Image (tube, coloured by chain):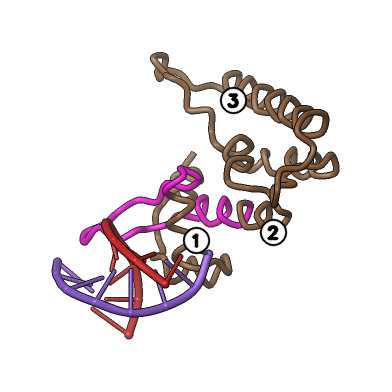
Chain colours: A brown, B red, C purple
DNA sequence: GTTCTCACA
DNA sequence: TGTGAGCA
């Protein structure tokens, strides 16, 4: 379990993350605004990113480069932060349940985009081939 | 020197 | 998204 702690331990400032992810500070903060990452803050309101955050940013970057827009990314790797009245025990069951949820949602939006709209200017977002990617990506948000 | 927020091109 | 201003 201590591994989780280390993984979520906030360590590097935005400058480091920029180099690690090849993203601009602007982008990183922008994604944060959209809830894609939630870095910790320290002393002077400085952002501190954990390994998890960096990994997530890398995934985001990956999706961005594939033409997925923020909205799409949100739907894919935004943890289904439910109400959690039962924050007592967040077991593996709830996690696997969460996975299925995101997966079905993913399928749904894939269908919608493939069958419905057709072409929204500059927004090709999702194609079937990326579904595999998403499945893989979802594995990181354990 | 680096990061932060906010605003504007 | 980029960039610049004004702070901490």
Q: Secondary structure at mark 2?
A: helix
Residue extending furthest toward the top:
A86
Check contact, mark 3 vs mark 2: CB within 8 A. no
Chain letter of disc 3 in the image: A
**Mark 1 = which residue?**
A27
Residue A56 within the segment the image draws in magenta: yes
Give the labeled residue for mark 3.
A95
Q: Quadrant of the C terminus of chain A?
A: top right
Q: Distance from label 3 to label 2 (Cα)?
A: 28 Å
- Chain identity of mark 1: A
Q: Tell me if A128 is positioned left or right of A90 in this view.
A: right
Looking at the rendered image, the disc whose residue lies closer to the viewer, 3 or 2, is 2
**Which residue carries the number 2 mark?**
A65
What number is the disc on residue A17? none
- Report the span colored magenta: A33-59
Q: Is residue A91 magenta?
A: no
The percent position of residue A66, horizontal first and vertical second, equals 73, 55
Q: In the figure, A18 relative to A73: above or below?
A: below
Q: Nearer the viewer, residue A105 or A40?
A: A105
Circle nearer the N terminus (1, 3): 1
């Amino acid at each position: 379990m201590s591994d989780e702690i280390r993984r979520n331990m906030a360590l590097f400032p935005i400058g480091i993350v920029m180099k690690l992810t090849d993203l601009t500070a602007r982008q990183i903060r922008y994604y944060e605004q959209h809830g894609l990452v939630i870095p910790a803050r320290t002393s002077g309101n400085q952002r501190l990113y954990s390994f998890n955050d960096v990994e997530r940013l890398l995934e985001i970057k990956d999706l961005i480069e594939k033409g997925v827009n923020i909205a799409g990314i949100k739907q894919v790797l935004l943890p289904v932060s439910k109400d959690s009245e039962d924050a007592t025990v967040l077991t593996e069951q709830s996690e696997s349940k969460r996975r299925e949820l995101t997966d079905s949602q993913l399928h749904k939006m894939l269908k919608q985009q493939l069958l419905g709209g057709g072409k929204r200017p500059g927004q090709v977002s999702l194609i079937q081939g990326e579904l595999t990617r998403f499945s893989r990506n979802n594995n990181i948000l354990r």
